[in-house]
Image (spheres, rainbow, N blue to C red):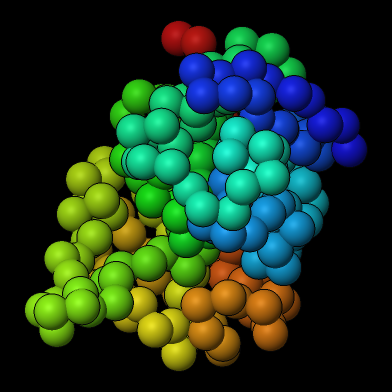
Amino acid sequence: MTVLEIDTPHGPANAHLHPAGQAKAALVLGHGAGGGVTSPDLLAAKDVAVSEDVSVALVEQPYRVAGRRSPPAASRLDAAWTAVLDELLAGELRGLALIAGGRSLGARVACRTADATGATAVLCLAFPLQPPARRSGDPSPSRLHELDQLTVPTLVVQGERDRFGTPPPATLRTVARVPGDHSLRTHPEAVAAAVRAWLPDVVDQAARAAVPG
């Protein structure tokens, strides 16, 4: 594993690289709002990906590198993420089809930027579908539109007791419900099984599409 410091418009980010021997594609994952890249679900997805000949980068956003727990505005997160992916795809992950994703906040960033980064698929771990009600008691708006805007194969791995709810499946969206809550900490093997059931076909499709001609 190698850690790269990558400059972004909002400070340095860190990319923890886990290269596969004969990489067919690249999986780049972001962390949750207050967590880091050692979350059990991220590590489970990373291990599956490497075993499927997919190189993995786990990305720490600049605010986490700087020691802050509260994330900045979505526009800053998206800009930093896009800068990191641009750097990786021009360097260590050059020539590999991109599968983008992350857990919770990181999943939202990957969804919003999928077109800009050229992602061929998206992996969402614990997508925070419905935020808590506002102080007024009014329901907060759903974030389903961030998933619905995707035009590439998508996997959502969601805890059965996730307080944010579960998005519905769709034509390009597979939803796997696993034991646990929003943290996805208690059953990483279930997360791994869900990713393993989805990833090989997506990788093969992405690899074929990346072949010139």
Q: Is residue 149 above or below residue 131?
A: above
Tell me which residue sits at (56%, 89%) in the image.
Answer: 179
Between 95 and 69, the residue placed more toward the observer is 69
Tell me which residue sits at (63%, 17%) in the image.
Answer: 7
State the image coordinates of residue 152 (x, y, percent, origin top left): 33, 42
Between 133 and 60, the residue placed more toward the observer is 133
Q: Is residue 21 above or below residue 121?
A: above
The image quadrant that residue 141 belongs to is bottom left
Between 136 and 184, the residue placed more toward the observer is 136
The image quadrant that residue 15 belongs to is top right
Q: Quadrant of the C terminus?
A: top left
Tell me which residue sits at (57%, 70%) in the image.
Answer: 194
- How many badges with numbers are in the image? 0
Q: Is residue 158 left or right of residue 67?
A: left
Q: Is residue 133 above or below residue 40?
A: below
Q: Quadrant of the N terminus?
A: top right
Q: Is residue 75 left or right of residue 209?
A: left
State the image coordinates of residue 72 (x, y, percent, origin top left): 43, 42
State the image coordinates of residue 203 (x, y, percent, origin top left): 57, 42
Q: Is residue 135 left or right of residue 115?
A: left
- Residue 174 in view of the camera: yes
Q: Is residue 139 left or right of residue 26?
A: left
The image quadrant that residue 28 belongs to is top right
Tell me which residue sits at (18%, 54%) in the image.
Answer: 145
State the image coordinates of residue 60 (x, y, percent, origin top left): 65, 41
- Residue 29 in view of the camera: no
